[in-house]
Amino acid sequence: MIRVTVRYHNLLRRTTRIAEERIELPESTSVRNALRHLAQRHRSPLREMLFDREGSPSLYLVIFRNRQLLRPEQHDDLLSDDDDLMLFPAVSGG
């Protein structure tokens, strides 16, 4: 098992009602599968904020792993013990 810290920001924090949590995941868990775990754990509406209708991580979700911005092609990268994920809803405005 690995332990990962997940930090929620902005609307995600309000939705989960927590700023951060430490979760245990099987070894060889990808970022995508960690998000699935969180969606199952917290259910709706977090699930809709993390994933699009096709089940891919939402384009409106910004993910940092160990303070490095992840690109969509990195969502299948495997997590390591003590990784830190920061989740932000994308913000737009004018």
Image: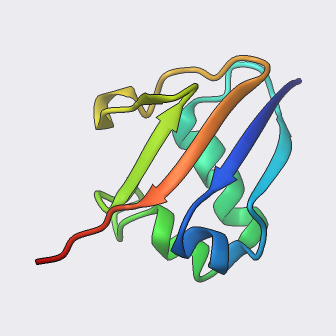
Give the answer, above or below, for where 65 lies relative to 33.
above
| The quadrant where residue 52 appears | bottom left
Closer to the camera in the image, 39 or 22? 22
| Residue 41 location (% of width, % of height) | 78, 64
- Residue 90 is left or right of residue 36, and the answer is left
Whole-percent x and y of residue 23?
84, 43
Q: Residue at x 30, y 29 (%)?
A: 73
Instruction: Check the picture and name the quadrant holding the C terminus.
Output: bottom left
**How many numbered marks appear?**
0
Front-lying residue, 59 or 64 = 64
Viewer can see residue 43: no
Q: Is residue 25 above or below residue 22?
A: above
**Of all residues shown, which one is farthest toward the left?**
94
Q: Write down the quadrant of residue 84 in the picture.
A: top right
Q: Is residue 80 visible?
A: yes
| Residue 22 sits in quarter | top right
Q: Nearer the viewer, residue 72 or 18?
A: 18
**Quarter in which the N terminus is drawn:** top right
- The foreground one among 88 and 59 is 88
Please report the residue visible at 77 percent of the width from the left and 20 percent of the height from the top: 27
The image position of residue 5, as x and y in percent, is: 76, 39
Is residue 44 positioned above or below 66 on the image?
Answer: below
x 64%, y 79%: residue: 15
Residue 59 horizontal/vertical position (percent)? 28, 57
User: Is 94 left, or right, of 33 in this rendering?
Assistant: left
